[in-house]
Amino acid sequence: MAQTDAVDLKWGMRMVLLDNALRPVEPLLVLACASVYAGGAWGSFKLAESFAYLFFRLSLMGLDRGIVWFYGQANSETYRRNLFASLGVVLIASVAGVLAMLGLSLTAIGSVRGLTLPFPDLLLIAGSIPLLAVSEMLFQANLNRQNMLARILGKNLLQPLITVGGSLASHFLGGPGLAFWFFLGCLANALAAGISFIRLHGASWSDMTATSPDRSLWKFSLPLSGADLLAGLTSRLDIMLLGTLANVRAVEIYNVVMMFGKSLTAIRSSFEGVLLSAFSRDGARNLTPQLRRRLNYAVWAVGNLLGLAMLAIVFWGQDLLSLMNKEYLDGYLALVTITAFTYLNIFGDFSGLMLQSLGRNRAWISAQLIGFFVNLGLNLWLIPQLGALGGVLALGGSTLAQGGLSQVLLWRSSGRHLWLKEFLQSSLGFASLLTSLCLISLWLDTLWLRLPLFLLATAGWLYVYRRRAQEFERNLEPLRTA
């Protein structure tokens, strides 16, 4: 019998809002750190770090999301056995990732790609892979016990403050370099994960058995690992094609635009672990009326929060780009475009998440594959004509294609309409208001005209959002924890 004390969706959304409120801490520190370590040290470190994160993500083999899904599919004893079995498998895979990264650094490929850091630094960065992997597994397991605070503190405060803050202090005081502080930051994050996990779940030597996760858990998780690899290839493909078919300036503009775009995507993706637990908590393998209502509420809530972020981008995007460098002003249209695509595709993104929750990973991977090939074709067509904007349009078009197919596959597998009228009408109302405000902002040339309108629009947006949320919550009893 499936467990019933899973994550309350309303609680999860409050935690995710806190998570996103603290996210600016790391980018602000990174900007300072990038300036003092400019001239090669920062670039070499970031490249090595990107390899570490790639191997970390692959070493999870999808089990981080799998264990959240499995919580709603098994009784407590079976879940606990599979949780510790998954931790053991991930630990072994992450150690293999360490060896793979160190081996890569000794080859010609590693040298060409810039992995020319001293071996002790490479060892510290590669040695962080198990810390990252195990802490991610522990944080994901904590979601099933309605605990996200340790993750927020560890990933948004402890790790960046120690990694970047320590590196800044070390630069002026003549201490150890970036790699040392990165390892120390990952260690602090892992300790936060471990302490919170033991407090919530407990642990004993009897849990440390050499077993493998159940077949059903593997069947759900392994396709997610392939999807992670596919997503990594897609992001690198865009940069490679821009450099080949356009020019370096287009690459620079695209990188700046996508820095903002990824921040918006992070707002959405930070909800995914909570929603996966909430969607899969009943152990249902079909889109029940309760699940459909949860899906609609999640799309409404997260989508309208992204709409507020889009309002800020349209009003202040040019000012933000100008502050960074006048050269980036040409990227304003691309910035608005990627923001609009992120906002529009919330229906498709969460439809894909629901496919995962119902255990239909093959359908979700099919949608991702279609998105990948659409991305490739649009890049080859649009980049030679439009440069960075072409790359953004290609990425946005591919996400819409992937999201649209996810909706079709979910609709066909469930045999029922996905979207409820009350939520859809409210979302369309917010979208109409957003479009009107954005068009008005294009006519306002001065700060003194835009600022009052933006503040008034934001206050009105939040007021209407809260009122509508209260109305929905009165009829959302199926969302609450049983």
Image (spheres, rainbow, N blue to C red):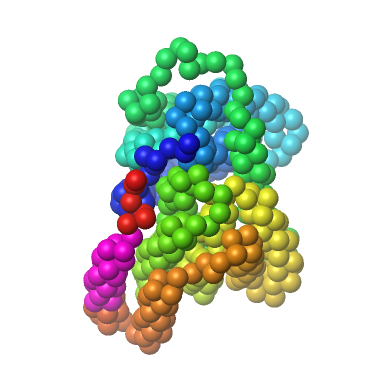
Residue depicted at 38% across the width and 84% down the height: 436
Whether 179 is drawn above or below 480: the answer is: above
> Residue 230 vs residue 324: left or right?
right
Residue 296 position, x and y percent, is 44, 64
* Residue 474 inside the magenta-drawn segment: yes
Residue depicted at 32% across the width and 25% down the height: 199
Residue 22 position, x and y percent, is 32, 48
Q: Nearer the viewer, residue 137 or 277?
A: 277
* Residue 119 inside the magenta-drawn segment: no
Residue 49 position, x and y percent, is 55, 37
Residue depicted at 68% across the width and 40% down the height: 113
* Number of numbered tags placed on the structure image: 0
Residue at the outermost front position: 1
Q: Can the viewer see residue 326?
A: no
Q: Can the viewer see residue 74?
A: yes
Residue depicted at 27% across the width and 68% down the height: 471
> Residue 120 vs residue 457: left or right?
right
Q: Nearer the viewer, residue 160 or 72?
A: 72
Whether 19 is drawn above or below 323: the answer is: above
Q: Is the magenta region chiefly helix, strand or loop? A: helix
Q: Nearer the viewer, residue 331 or 278?
A: 278
Residue 404 position, x and y percent, is 61, 67
Q: Nearer the viewer, residue 18 or 219?
A: 219
Q: Quadrant of residue 411?
A: bottom right
> Residue 78 vs residue 201: left or right?
right
* Magenta span of residues: 456-476
